Image: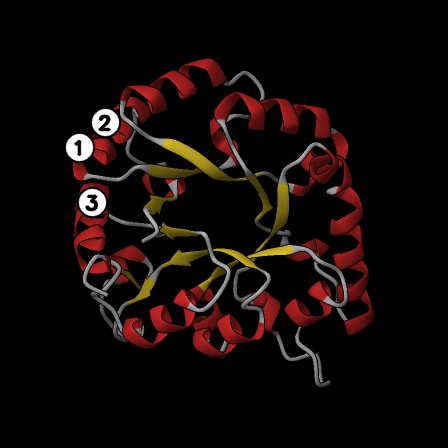
Amino acid sequence: MRDFSYQLYSSRKFPPLADTLAMLGNLGYSQVEGFGGLYGPGADVGALRAGLDENGLSMPTAHFGLPTVRDTPDEVIATAKALGIKVVLVPHIAAPDRPADAAGWAAFGRELVEAGKPIRDAGFAYGWHNHEFEFTDLGGDDLPLDLMLGDNDLALELDLAWVEVGGQSAVDYINKYADRIVSVHLKDIAPEGECLDEDGWADVGFGIMDWPAIMAAVDKSSAQYLVMEHDNPNDHQRFASRSLSAAKEF
């Protein structure tokens, strides 16, 4: 049985980090996922590692921006080694930088592969984390995510709720890339008109996602890490606690 992880981005509005790590350890989490704000310039990576260790937490997966991966791969590798990270994931591309056509998305996939070579050569898994824009209709048969992955071997962290927000089936995409998925984001969508103060997201298991069907597909995939995420909770302890309890019942 896989352990559940927690994307620390969910708690970015609830400092200090030390309190968040203690909360997660006390709730029964054993893993967290990092994001760039935790280990950017001036960050104390040693203190972060100490906080993880003190609370029985590991950080097997982490997000790093593409400019950081591309321009300072040695820093990414050093950070990953210091924190025990096994999987480096590029999570986003800003709207002005997104390709406008199929050829552009395919080229972006190649750019990701090239940028990640030093990371992979250092022994880390490396891949992409999706949002909803990778499912934009380009007027052809393939969507941006399919074009990005192409015939390369990038790993994939599939954010299940963003797939659905993008108008696609999470189950279908889990099945489509079952052997490419290294991790999934467990995120839930509130019923229409609810949780508006939380940008329409729900605690995992309290929204409209079909978790029994989704988890049945995940169980058949190569996903190693199950990561809780909420983009804007108004109470991160409530989110962390209720989501973990619900997910254990899936």
Residue bearing the label numbered 1: 26
What residue type is disc 3 on? Asp
Label 2 Cα crowd, 10 Å radius (few <14 / some 14-19 / many 20+): some
What label does residue 34 carry, if any?
none
Which residue corresponds to the image point at 63% horizontal and 50% vertical from the top-left?
127
Image: 22 above or below 139: above
Image: 108 above or below 126: below
At which x and y percent is residue 178?
Answer: 54, 68
What residue type is disc 1 on? Asn
Q: Secondary structure under badge 3?
A: loop
Sequence-wise, the earlier of marks 3 and 2 is: 2
Nearer to me, 137 or 107: 107
Tell me the mark number nearer the camera, choosing from 3 and 1.
Answer: 1
Q: Do the residues under discs 3 and 1 have CB atoms within 8 angstroms? A: no
Residue bearing the label numbered 3: 235
Sequence-wise, the earlier of marks 3 and 1 is: 1
Which residue corresponds to the image point at 24% horizontal and 65% vertical from the top-left?
250
Q: Do the residues under discs 3 and 2 have CB atoms within 8 angstroms? A: no
Q: Secondary structure under badge 1?
A: helix
Which residue corresponds to the image point at 75% horizontal and 58% vertical from the top-left?
109
Which residue corresponds to the image point at 57% horizontal and 49% vertical from the top-left?
91
Q: CA distance from mark 3 to mark 1?
A: 16 Å
